[in-house]
Image (spheres, coloured by chain):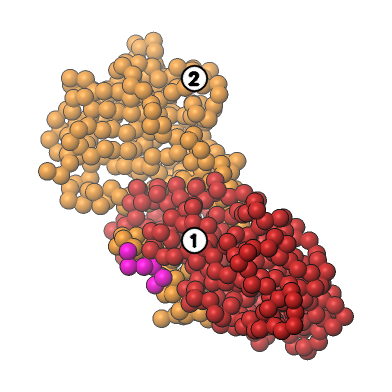
Chain colours: A red, B orange
């Protein structure tokens, strides 16, 4: 029942224009999307000028996007949508089980072509002057049995201390601060990286404009991205956050979860790193 | 109160991240947008893959858009959003008065740099072989007093019989099938044009992909776009539709209103046109 003073049949007309060959899931999603978009417009009495400002912003996002940057994704991130669909997706996947390692968003700086490195390698190929070196290590294991998983892939990526990922920064060599590692016979992975530092999401485009209009800062708390995979297990995408970071409670893209907060501790007698981080990854076996 | 099984504080956290310097209207719009987008995602359990498909579609829309094409606008049009914000905007403007000439959407093919032509001119500069010529004429008048308005501007544009506007078609000369006219001392405008024909909206981009997925046709009923302006009056943007068109009841962008349907009638003794259309435009004076 319409409780507004606009054409009461309009939204149903648009929804009912879908033909019989529409897939059931697409029909569900488009029905929900059309209802919410129309309700949003009516409830807030959205004007033509305001709508057109939104269209321009979304077109701008597409125009800034290429294989190294996904601004449409970032626009969603600053209103929490990627974190929300991440929660939904993994809630659905996990409902039959206890919670394994919590998940977090992929973010726009993942690269599909990251190479493997040997365990013990240093991913900090281009060294920033102000970086703190850390030795990160841990095991990949089966969530239920705690059995170590041999030959699992752990992929990591992080920004440098200037807040830039390598594909954003011509002064970093390609694949700097990222790598894939295979767990050894004990299920272990280990490598040298930077203690992560907070950085602003790119704010020279529509996402930055939205943050500015909403009087919000663009910073993300310091974090390392992780994807872990093993045959027969569900892939895990997550981020881990430094407990000492000042943006932990107000991440500009809303990705922090308590269980993903980690502690860097002092490491002694290693000339390569003064800090250490132990982080075990638990994977859930595919449904039989 | 949350009636779902996801983080019950998430949406409020995102909304409450807006700082104190956010403008009140932007705060209202972003609050409504974030609520509806999050509710849409939760109610339909939107997955990461589905969301990413949407991001790719929106980025694609931006990448296709330039000064001659606005694909983001067309994506909104096929889910009725432009027609809805048009209704909202003019409902708000008209609530103190009886309804003047109904409005309709601008559409993506308006050009801001359309030149003036003399009354009596023929806007069909590039003649299609299968076009039916029409003489369109009428008066611009004050909605309340019915006084003719002298020196009002009537701007029109239409597609050719191949379904293309001049900026889409290298075989049409620039500004073909569009022009601006000034009303004469009796408030009259008149010119020669084509009887409009139905055409599909461009379906080689994301809007076309959406229509295909929703099992919908891309056709718009035959129409002529009109913008009428005069100092001291509210500008009017509208479209008029040919009553004989077979797509009148299922316009792909939902712009048809009953009061905008017109009749082309036979015109005798004019070697330039066998059809005639009389259409008066009523403008509402600005609030004093």
- The secondary structure type at the circle numbered 1 is helix
Residue B19 counted in the magenta span: yes
Question: Total number of numbered labels?
Answer: 2
Seen at 74% across and 74% down, the residue is: A272
* Visible residue check, residue B144: yes
Q: For mark 2, does the 10 Å Cα neighbourhood hold few (<14), some (14 to 19), or many (20 or more) residues?
A: few
Image quarter where the N terminus of chain B lies is bottom left
Q: Chain of mark 1?
A: A
Q: Give the x, y percent position of residue B80.
A: 44, 50
Left or right, residue A253 beside residue B33: right
Callout 2: chain = B
Instruction: Give left or right: position of B230 versus B193.
Output: left
Give the residue at x 22% y 32%.
Answer: B230
Q: Within the magenta stretch, is there residue A48? A: no
Residue, x 34% and y 33% (percent of image)? B226
* Viewer-side label of 2, 1: 2
Marker disc for residue B173: 2
Residue behind mark 1: A33
Q: What residue span does the magenta drawing correspond to?
A: B16-21
Among the 4 quarters of the image, the one containing residue B232: top left
Q: Nearer the viewer, residue A123 or B118?
A: A123
Residue at 81% across / 66% down in the picture? A117
């Amino acid at each position: 029942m319409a409780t507004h003073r606009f054409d009461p049949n309009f939204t149903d007309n648009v929804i009912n224009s879908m033909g019989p060959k529409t897939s059931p899931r697409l029909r569900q999603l488009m029905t929900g999307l059309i209802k919410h978009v129309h309700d949003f417009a009516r409830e807030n009495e959205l004007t033509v000028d305001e709508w057109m400002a939104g269209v321009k912003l979304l077109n701008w996002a597409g125009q800034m996007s290429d294989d190294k940057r996904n601004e449409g994704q970032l626009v969603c991130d600053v209103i929490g949508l990627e974190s929300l669909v991440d929660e939904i997706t993994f809630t659905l996947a996990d409902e039959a089980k206890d919670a394994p390692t919590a998940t977090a968003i992929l973010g726009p700086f993942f690269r599909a072509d990251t190479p493997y490195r040997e365990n013990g390698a240093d991913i900090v190929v281009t060294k920033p002057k102000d970086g703190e070196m850390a030795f990160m290590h841990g095991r990949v294991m089966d969530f239920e049995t705690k059995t170590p998983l041999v030959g699992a892939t752990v992929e990591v990526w992080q920004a440098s201390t200037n807040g830039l990922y390598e594909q954003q920064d011509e002064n970093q060599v390609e694949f700097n601060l990222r790598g894939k590692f295979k767990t050894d016979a004990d299920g272990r992975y280990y490598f040298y990286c930077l203690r992560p530092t907070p950085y602003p999401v790119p704010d020279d485009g529509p996402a930055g404009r939205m943050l500015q209009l909403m009087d919000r800062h663009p910073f993300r708390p310091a974090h390392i991205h992780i994807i872990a995979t093993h045959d027969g297990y569900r892939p895990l995408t997550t981020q881990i956050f430094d407990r000492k970071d000042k943006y932990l409670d107000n991440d500009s893209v809303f990705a922090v979860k308590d269980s993903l907060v980690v502690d860097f501790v002092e490491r002694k007698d290693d000339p390569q790193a003064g800090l250490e981080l132990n982080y075990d990854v638990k994977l859930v076996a595919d449904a039989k």
